[in-house]
Image (cartoon, rainbow, N blue to C red):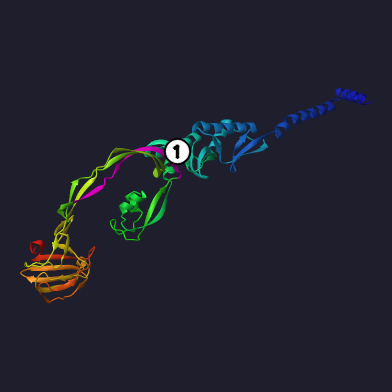
Amino acid sequence: MEEPNIKRLLERIKTDKKLQKLVAAVLCSLIVLAVFVPIYNRSVLEVSVNGEVLGNVKDTIALEQIKAELEEKYKDALGVDVEFVQEIKAVPIRAFGQEVETEEDMLKKLESVLSYRLKAVAINIADKEVALVKDKATAEEVLSEVKNHYINETPGELVKVEVVEQVKLVERYVYPNQVIDMEDAVELILKGGVETRQYEVVQGDSLWSISRKENIPLDDLIKANPQLKSEHELALGEILNLNEIKPLLNVKLVKKVTYEESIPYKTETIRDDSLWTWDQVIKQPGEKGSKEIAAEVTFKNGIKVEETVLGEKVIKEPVNRIVARGTKAEVAFRGSGRFLWPIVGQITSPYGWRGREFHAGIDICQSKGAPVRASNSGTVTFAGWRGGYGNLVIINHGGGIETYYAHNSSLLVSVGQQVEKSQQIATVGSTGRSTGPHVHFEIRVNGSPVNPMEYLNK
């Protein structure tokens, strides 16, 4: 039934010119719609970074290709993978009336606004990041150089090397200015940080001895203690600051070492009755020997912390020092000469040089409390305490001659008193600079000490 209607319509169009025009207009409109609608509905991607619109690209494929080319360009220039810090946003918009950037133009625009991070390797020591280097090979070289630093500065044949802390190498993206070169990383790990501790000065300390004992350079010790009034004098109990460099990585070495050590000689004493008791003669000088020691030494950061001796070999035996010591004693006694002996006893130290010290009189040994007598008559000019002499009596005999009686336990005379020859003036003691009861006896002429033996009767 419909087919006849279509035929009649077609027949009518063929004969009706108005209808022909109408149909032609409808067909033209349909053709225009068929062409325009797809064009109008087509979209492009609007690209932006941090809210700034950079332009449009054709589609996602084109944008990904541009990003890949940009990453490859940085990788070729820097030698490492990179990632961009900012997010590149792409939003679809209608393409109608929009311009599409060329791949080259969009590449330049992105490069001008994007910042990037490099793929680097973090050196983590005891779970703490200490340095960032460009790659794993550099990180491993850094650790090797740190070990070699201590290996080269310590003597001996290497047995074992190990690091105390756990070390991890971790890849991550970082800003370019965070990456340091190999030499700087080595120095950073070796020098680490400065740790300050306190030290209390004890008897015998000096800045020099503390520097050696604590293994701290003297200049560094002085700089750490600006409060010191003098570099040459320290007070007992004074507190000093000790600044020590603490490496970030502790390296432990075990080395086999061989070294020579001196063997001290012994002193052999023989008795000689031809010498006075205060005399001694070196019959044979001593000579040190030497021995070779093989040991395993443990170093921590270049400092020796432990040593195990593996063996010793004597290279040269020491030669004993032989000293002859006198046994001949001289006994003091009273006589009828001009000056009397102040006390009877053995002379333990004669007049003259004793090593580096000059002994201005003679020492006569006797028990504490024994009577001390005036060597000649005269006037007491001093009776009391005088430094190293202890309790001292001085008698003026006229003619510029004086006698001294030192180290007494008690004094029996006073200044200005006249005394007679052989009168008791004191009792034997060990006061002042003395190691035992005795009388230190001096004769002085015009203020200068002389040898008492030349004035005493034998």
Write down the quadrant of residue 452 in the picture: bottom left
In which quadrant is the C terminus drawn?
bottom left
Q: SS for tag 1?
A: strand
Left or right of 232 on screen, residue 364: left
Q: Is residue 142 visible?
A: no
Q: Nearer the viewer, residue 235 or 331?
A: 331
Q: How would you rate the neighbour count of disc 1 (Cα within 10 Å): few for under 14, some for 14-19, many for 20 or more?
A: some
Give the residue at the far left of this rendering.
399
Q: Give the magenta range.
A: 248-271
Q: Residue at x 85, y 27 (%)?
A: 19
Left or right of 201 on screen, residue 25: right
Instruction: Decide whether residue 443 is among the magenta residues.
Output: no
* Residue 164, position as x, y percentages in the image: 48, 43
Query: Is 211 drawn above or below residue 334 in the view shown?
Result: above
Amino acid at circle 1: Val
Instruction: Decide whether residue 260 is among the magenta residues.
Output: yes
Q: Which residue is mark 1?
A: 161
Query: Is 14 drawn above or below residue 295 in the view shown?
Result: above
Query: Is 209 drawn above or below residue 94 in the view shown?
Result: below
